[in-house]
Image: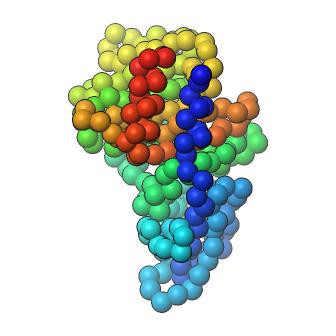
Amino acid sequence: MSLDQFLDRAGDTTSSLVVVNRNQPLPVQRMLEKLFDGQPVAVEESDVPGEDDAVLLVRDGEVVASSPLSAVMDAVLLVNSDLFITGSRDLADAELPAVLDELEDTRFDVRGYPENDTEKLLLIAVSRAIEREAWLADEGKVRSAFQRLSRMNDESGTRAVYETLADSDLDVHVYGIADWVPDSGFDVTAHAGYGDDFRKSWFVLHRLPGGGGSLLLAYQTAPTAWSGFWTSDESLVEDVAAYLRREL
């Protein structure tokens, strides 16, 4: 039994992101297409009466969310992972545009550097958005896996985020290989081990006191490849939280 058992509970629906009346340069469209290449999300263009430079999320022929193209650009297209690692982007600015947020329960298979330098960006942005959600709620429990606990210390942006969360009323738990011990002033509970769940899982789970919350869960399938999804489904959040309490 391992955390990857929960990946099968992601949905199998397909969606489309439709860029409407694009005024932005063509390379912006190409970046969006590249980000979702090979994923169950088609990227299209359309010219219809209405707002320019908008992105629509379409599922089963219905528009389920819309966002300005500029918001999608700022969230994932015009950034790189260093922005999150170094802390150049403030936690308060980590909100996801609705068209990305509503892609929850969609399973993504992504590659990291050096095979690909963009595919993981969406999952990284979702991780930060859940951390932001927890910080704004200022209640509940956060459980996050880093593969190596030392990543919290080596990545200044990650450390800054978790110091902010630890200084709030949240109960913060972190998971990874035991290669670093948080100092006494860093108010987090560290869970260390060497099994597959510690070495291969990447998750951020925020559970509210009354139940429910948000979860990103990804599992390493190759040295630089991940399969994962995010969700606000209460039963799934509860089941993963129970697994973490019991097994890790």
Q: From the viewer's perspective, is 197 left or right of 212?
A: right
Q: Percent x, y for residue 231?
A: 45, 46
How far across and down, in percent of the image, does residue 129 sit? 41, 45
Q: How many marks?
A: 0
Is 187 drawn above or below residue 34 in the view shown?
above
Q: Nearer the viewer, residue 152 or 1?
A: 1
For residue 67, above or below residue 202? below
At 55% from the left and 46% from the top, the residue drawn is: 10
Residue 232 in sight: yes
Q: Could you tell me which quadrant the N terminus lies in? A: top right
Residue extending furthest toward the right: 115
Q: Is residue 84 visible?
A: no
Which quadrant of the view contains residue 14?
A: bottom right
Residue drawn 44% across the image and 38% down it: 236
Specify whether 65 is left or right of 45. left
In x, y percent, where is residue 30?
68, 66
Against 232, is 96 above or below? below
Q: Quadrant of residue 185?
A: top left
